[in-house]
Image (cartoon, rainbow, N blue to C red):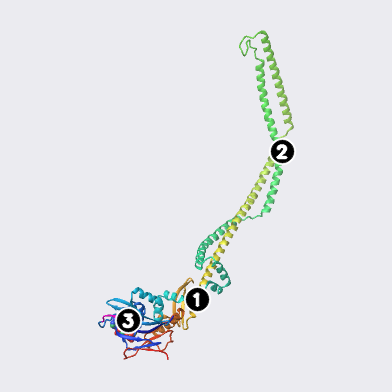
Amino acid sequence: MQVIFKSMTLVNFKSHRDITVNFGEQTDITGDNAEGKSTVCEIPSYVFYGTDALGSKLDPTPITYEADETKVSLLLEIDGKELMLGRSLKKNKTTYYVNDVPSKAGEFNEVVEKLFDKDLFLSLYNPNYFPSMHWEKQRSMLLQYVPSPVNKDVLKHMPDEQSKCLSALLKKHSLEDIKKIHAENKTSMDKKYIAAQSRTKTLREQLDQIAPTVALDSLKVEEGQLLKQIKEIEKITDSAWDTNQKINTLNTRIRSMLSEREQMKEDFQRLKDEEIQGSCRVCKQPLKDESLESAEMEKQDRIKKFKENYNAQVIQRKELEEELSKLEYIDVSEQIEKVRELERQRDPLLQEIRNHGQYEQLNNQVNQAQADENETLQSLNESIFILDSVKAFKAKEAELQGEKVQALFETLSVRLFEEQKNGDLKNTFEIELDKKPYRKLSTAEGIRAGLELRDVLSQQSDLITPVFVDNAESITSFKQPVGQLIVSRVVAGQKLKIEGVDAE
Ligand SMILES: Nc1ncnc2c1ncn2[C@@H]1O[C@H](COP(=O)(O)OP(=O)(O)OP(=O)(O)O)[C@@H](O)[C@H]1O
Ligand SMILES: [Mg+2]
């Protein structure tokens, strides 16, 4: 889209009582200081936005003379179509005009907004406007025309390993999320790794303390031999135990039978001395003769039975005594002492064998701890690698985007990123000419830089507008900008002169 200024009228606008400006392809404004050159420059922005050319609110009411009404109008040609915009200010009340038709503020603003973006127009019209904006605004305005490179392009320019790793991760998460995930994992793995290392170390120290000195096999052989000897001896002591036990049992039984015999003797005496009672033991009736006789018989019978019993007991005892006389007590105290001695030798071996088991168990724990440690380290290293890759990605993305932006400029360089102390990139925006930032440039350098910038913006946005170069007497030469050029120059002793010049 091309915006052309055709003509402009101003009545009672600051020092100007009534002038008409006819613009050409180039419009030269000349005159001595304070002739009102810069004021002319403010009209278009005032008509559109009620501001000066830097976007600050403007009150053009004359202060050096009495005036009823301030009135300005600007005739534009936009892509071949004419549009007349105007404003008048009377007693602090603004009236708007679109093609001479009085309009409400809202209607008027809508017409203007539809034409072009305010920041863009002011940037193109006034070469000083763009650098006066906040750097973030400048950056986003320029970058809206230079989209950041797509992930695929960035990955293509990265080392193979990093590229492969990130492209897989980018299928699931955004770069920022990848960074968050692995920054968190790195922090927790850092801690976990330190803990895992110390656990492995502690367990290893414990393991060293119980390291067996003799091999398990030879311990088992030695212990086995001792056990075999013990078993041999125990065979002897066990059988001796049987015999000795038998002797003890026989002795005990014989002793008890002897005391039983003493008891029997006493009992027998009592039985013999027993008198037959004259009455029934049960019913207490005096016994008859035949009954007495049978009682006597019964007593004799009992005596007989008792004797039989007694003799049987004696026979049995004699048999036991006979059996005992054949047995001989075996003394195994020597063997028992030997077994004790062997057990004494075997105990430390058994302890050593058990120690082998504990060692084995602890060794497993050490191996598990070492595996945990390795796994943690691997996860930690992986996150470090990914975080480095993210950083490399961002750096490459910035580099590619920087190159794209830089390619738009001829003499200026543009810095979009700044490396922080931690190596991360931070957004920034700096326009430089020969490594000097814009704000350090001389007046003429500043005008040239501003013109190059607005030309880039004009090309990128496809919007052509007039550009105003104020105080051009301070600059020897500059490149013809894109669009109509309005130039003001101080000429000593000269009244204000405005001349539109068209190419022949
Ligand atoms: N509201 C106003 N009413 C009347 N005069 C004003 C008003 N505001 C500014 N002026 C005066 O208008 C005159 C023209 O100012 P302007 O800045 O346009 O001059 P200039 O030609 O650009 O001067 P220079 O060569 O110094 O840049 C100045 O004397 C200024 O003080
Ligand atoms: Mg001036």
Viewer-nearest residue: 213 or 80:
80
Mark 3 is surrounded, within 10 Å at the Cα level, by few (under 14), some (14 to 19) or many (20 or more) other residues, namely many
Q: Point out the residue furthest to the top here.
A: 289
Q: CA distance from mark 3 to mark 1?
A: 44 Å
Callout 2 secondary element = helix
68 inside magenta stretch: yes
Residue type at mark 1: give it.
Gln
Per the image, the residue denoted by label 3 is 72
Residue 399 x %, y %: 51, 76
Amino acid under disc 3:
Val
Position of residue 195 relative to residue 148, above or below, is above
Q: Does label 3 or label 1 sit earlier along the sequence?
A: 3
Q: Which residue is mark 2?
A: 239
Tell me how far mark 2 sits from mark 1, CA to CA.
101 Å
> Label 3 vs label 2: CA separation?
138 Å
> 10 Å neighbourhood of mark 2: few (<14), some, or many (≥20)?
few
**The label number, if any, that marks residue 204 in the structure image:** none
Residue positioned 49% across, 67% down in the render: 176
Q: Is residue 343 above or below residue 46?
A: above
**Residue 404 percent coordinates (x, y):** 50, 78
Which residue is denoted by mark 1 in the rendering? 401
